[in-house]
Image (cartoon, rainbow, N blue to C red):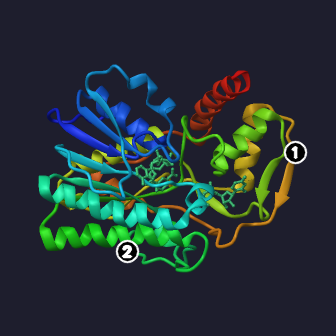
Amino acid sequence: MARLYDSRKRVMVTGGAGFIGSHLIDRLIQEGHEVLCVDNLFTGTKRNIDHLHGNPRFEFLRHDVTFPLYVEVDEIYNLACPASPIHYQYDPVQTTKTSVHGAINMLGLAKRLSCPIFQASTSEVYGDPHQHPQTESYWGNVNPIGPRSCYDEGKRCAETLFFDYQRQHGLEIRVARIFNTYGPRMHHADGRVVSNFIVQALRGEPITLYGDGSQTRAFCYVDDLVEGMIAMMQAGQEASGPINLGNPVEFSIAELAEQVVALVGSRSEIVYKPLPQDDPTQRCPDISRAQSLLNWQPVTTLETGLHSTVGYFQTLLQELESA
Ligand code: NAD
Ligand code: UDP
C-alpha cells in the first residue's frame, strides 16, 4: 500500500524535470503537497513536467544548483545531476560542480530553513566493487582519476558534506544510494542500457552489447524507487542512511538484451562493442537495511517494468518521428 504523508508540505525537488525527479513530483502532488521543481534542463525536459503546468500546487524554477538559491520550503529532495555516463562525461567539471557546489548550496539552504534534506547518491560510490552484493558498510573501489570519476567522486564528496552538515550543524539528512533505475521518461538518447536496448529493438537496429555481456546489474522500476525515497524522508533520523535503494534481483546484460528483444518481438541482432573503461563487472544491492528500517522492497518484476517502459518509448519514438 502506498505510504501517505501526515500533513501537506512545500517540497522542493532539484532535478525535478529529469526522469526520477518528475516521477517523485507526480507522487508528491498526488499526496496534496506543493512542489517547487528546480532544474536547469541540462538533461531534463519540459515534456516530463508538461502535464503539471496549470496545477496550482506546482511551480517550475529554471535554476542551476551550482549557484545559491533563496526560497522557503519545508523539505528538500536533491536530485540535480546528470546520471547517464554520456551526459555526466560531456562536461565532467560541471558534473563535479553540480554534485559538490550543488550539495553545498542545497545544504546551506536546508540549514537556514532547518528542514530535512534528501540526497540522491548512487551505487557508483562503490565503484567496481570487491564486495558482492554491496552493503552500506562497504567503502568501495573507485578510480579517482578515470572518466567516471567526476560522477563517482562528486557523489562521494556530496555524501561527505551531508554527513558533515549532520555532525557539525545537526541537520536532518537522508542519503540514499540508488542502484540502476529504469522506467518511462528515461531520456531516449542517454546511452543507458535499458533505454538503448529498447530504442534499438523498437527501431530494428542492432543491440549494442558492451564486452561479452556477462557484467551484471540489478534494475529497479522507478515507482518502487520513489516509494523507497518517500519512505526514507518520512522515517526518523535513524533513516539518515546511507541506505541502498535498488532491486536485489541481478541480471547479466546479455540476459537483459534477450528479454528486451523477446518483449518487443524485434528482429534486432546483437552486436558486440568494447567494454567502456572502468565499467563495473557486477553490481547488486544488499537491501537488508532498507527492509528493516523502512519496511521497503521493490515489488515490480523486470518483465512488468520493461513492459510499461517499452510502451512509453513506442509513443515517444512515434512522436519524435512525426515531429
Ligand atoms: P536525469 O538526468 O534524468 O535527471 C537529472 C536532472 O538534474 C535533469 O533534469 C537535469 O536537467 C538536472 N540537472 C543537472 N544538472 C543540474 C544543475 N547544475 N542544476 C539544476 N539541475 C540540474 O537523471 P535521473 O536518472 O533522473 O537521476 C536523478 C538523480 O538520481 C541524479 O542525482 C542521479 O545521480 C541519481 N541516480 C540515478 C540513478 C538511475 O539509475 N537513474 C542511479 C543512481 C543515482
Ligand atoms: N551497456 C551495454 N550496451 C549499451 C549500454 C550499456 O552493454 O548500449 C552496458 C554497460 O557497459 C554496463 C551496463 O550495460 O555494463 C549498464 O550501463 P548503464 O550505462 O546503463 O549504467 P551503469 O554502467 O552506470 O550501471
Q: Nearer the viewer, residue 175 or 158?
A: 158
User: Disc 1 on helix, strand or loop?
Assistant: loop
Q: Which mark is residue 269?
A: 1
Q: Quadrant of residue 198?
A: top right
Mark 2 to mark 1 CA distance (whole Å): 41 Å
Circle nearer the N terminus (2, 1): 2
Q: Sort mark 2 into few (<14), some (14-19) or many (20+) by Cα contacts within 10 Å.
A: few
Against 159, residue 178 (above or below) is above
Q: Nearer the viewer, residue 238 or 153?
A: 153
Relative horizontal placement of residue 222, taking residue 238 as reference (left or right)? right
Answer yes or no: is residue 135 visible. no
Q: Residue at x 48, y 61 (%)?
A: 285
Residue 283, position as x, y percentages in the image: 57, 64
Relative horizontal placement of residue 292, taking residue 8 as reference (left or right)? right
Against 55, residue 62 (above or below) is below
Residue 302, position as x, y percentages in the image: 59, 42
